Image (tube, rainbow, N blue to C red):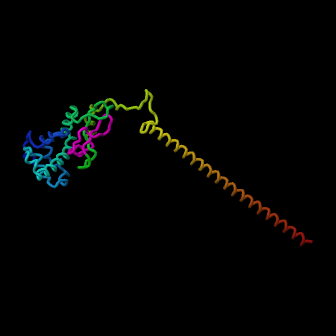
Amino acid sequence: MSQSNISVNENGWIKWYCNLEDHHFFCEIDEFFIADQFNLYGLKQLFDHFEEALQMILSPNTPTDEDLEDDQFLELYNEASELYGLLHARFIITPQGLTLMKSKYLQGRFGVCPRVLCERQNVLPIGLSHDLRTSRVKIFCPRCQDVYSPKKQMSDVDGSFFGSVFPHIFLSVFSELNPTQPANEYVSKIFGFKVHKKKGSKFQIQQNQTEMYYYAEDHIKRLSQIQSSQQQQSQQQQQQQQQSQKNDEEAEKKQKEALNAIQKLQKQKQKK
């Protein structure tokens, strides 16, 4: 499809789709982006009715109530929704898409972090996978660097419509939007005193790590003792072998001396 055949319509399918309930995370993809064959690479084989779904997305007309009751139309609509979502994941990491998403972020359209200590930090949409129908869209908090489910369950908004890299590219491009203060950490206390040995607390984790360290150190000591014992045994065996060899040499020497003495006596007897 060439760009010359496209007529931009402010009230087309794209605008209608992005204004549907629970679709406020979406931005409107530029039609020229959709028409570029480079941006469609690898998507055709994922859909049975790719061309028809693409035509629906670029349609200047919006669906009627009768269309939404037609099973055949709804089947094609589902493919068009998924195709738009995958294109959306590619579009929002372009300069134009990032700018549109920045406007939504600053307006708080994606919501705020549900973690109390993040003090209503604005969040960004994220997917846990680039594959369709793996998980729904989630939200990423730039302050605590964690992922949560959005306040509203968006049943038809797939995580792949945003991808797993969008928040990180967004915060790299707009580095001034990175939170200047680190996330506050909650500390368990009773009457002002920190609670130790609480299940799941940092103290317990550190204690376990310390125990592992001492276990490792004790293990090393035992290995060292074993190695030292083996060396001592080896030295003892060497000493025993040397002593045995020395004893054999002395016995052999004494035997030779005795033989020499006997030979001398025999010679003396023969002379007499």
Residue at the bottom extreme, as displayed: 270
- Lateral position of residue 248 relative to residue 198, left or right: right
Location of residue 202 with respect to 44 vertically, above or below: above
**Residue 20 in picture, x, y percent from top left:** 15, 40
The C terminus sits in image quarter: bottom right
- Of all residues shown, which one is farthest toward the top? 192
Residues shaded magenta: 136-165
Q: Residue at x 25, y 45 (%)?
A: 136
Q: Is residue 68 left or right of residue 234?
A: left
Residue 182, by quadrant, is top left
User: Percent x, y for residue 81?
Assistant: 16, 47
Name the one closer to the observer, 119 or 31.
119
- Locate residue 167 relative to residue 96 in the image: left or right: right
Question: How far from the left and from the top, in percent, is residue 143?
Answer: 31, 34
Residue 14 magenta: no
Q: Main secondary structure of the magenta part?
A: loop
Front-most of residues 93 and 57: 57
Residue shown at 70%/56% (left/top)? 240
